[in-house]
Image (cartoon, grey):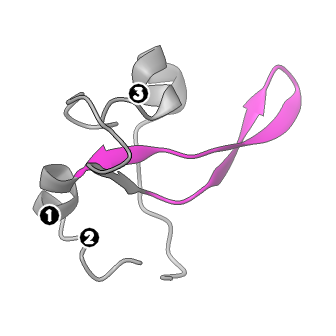
Amino acid sequence: MATAEIAVPDPAALSSSQQRGTQCVWCTIALTNGTARNLGPRPIDAHGTSVLWFPRCCHHCWDERGLAEWR
């Protein structure tokens, strides 16, 4: 796995479906476990408590951003 974190939109600016990982964080296409790419866990603040968020994207956005080397 790469040590650099992939830049993603601020979760507060995303829809609830994008936050939950059922839509791509960039293009909003619907995702399933078979069509999603995980972008790595990241800590976020949820009402004063640190929790992990697991953003996901579609294969098209993954390829478009040149993330093939990130694993």
Residue 14, by quadrant, is: top left
Name the residue tied to disc 3: 18
Identify the amino acid type marked 2. Answer: Leu
Q: Residue at x 41, y 55 (%)?
A: 7
Taking depth in this image into account, of 31 and 63 the one nearest to the observer is 31
Q: Secondary structure at mark 2?
A: loop
Q: Is residue 49 left or right of residue 68?
A: right
Gap in angstroms between the C-alphas marked 3 and 2: 19 Å
Name above or below for residue 56 compared with residue 3.
Answer: above
Name above or below for residue 38 compared with residue 14.
Answer: below
Q: Is residue 26 left or right of residue 43?
A: left
Q: Is residue 28 left or right of residue 8?
A: left
Spot occupied by residue 32 in the image (x, y as percentages of width and height) = 33, 39
Name the residue tied to disc 2: 67
**Location of the C terminus (image quadrant):** bottom left
Spot occupied by residue 46 in the image (x, y as percentages of width and height) = 77, 26
Magenta-colored span: 39-58
Spot occupied by residue 21 in the image (x, y as percentages of width and height) = 45, 35
Spot occupied by residue 43 in the image (x, y as percentages of width and height) = 71, 48
Name the residue tied to disc 1: 63
Q: Secondary structure at mark 1?
A: helix
Identify the amino acid type marked 3. Answer: Gln
Gap in angstroms between the C-alphas marked 1 and 2: 6 Å
- Looking at marks 3 and 2 on the same chain, the residue that comes earlier in the sequence is marked by 3
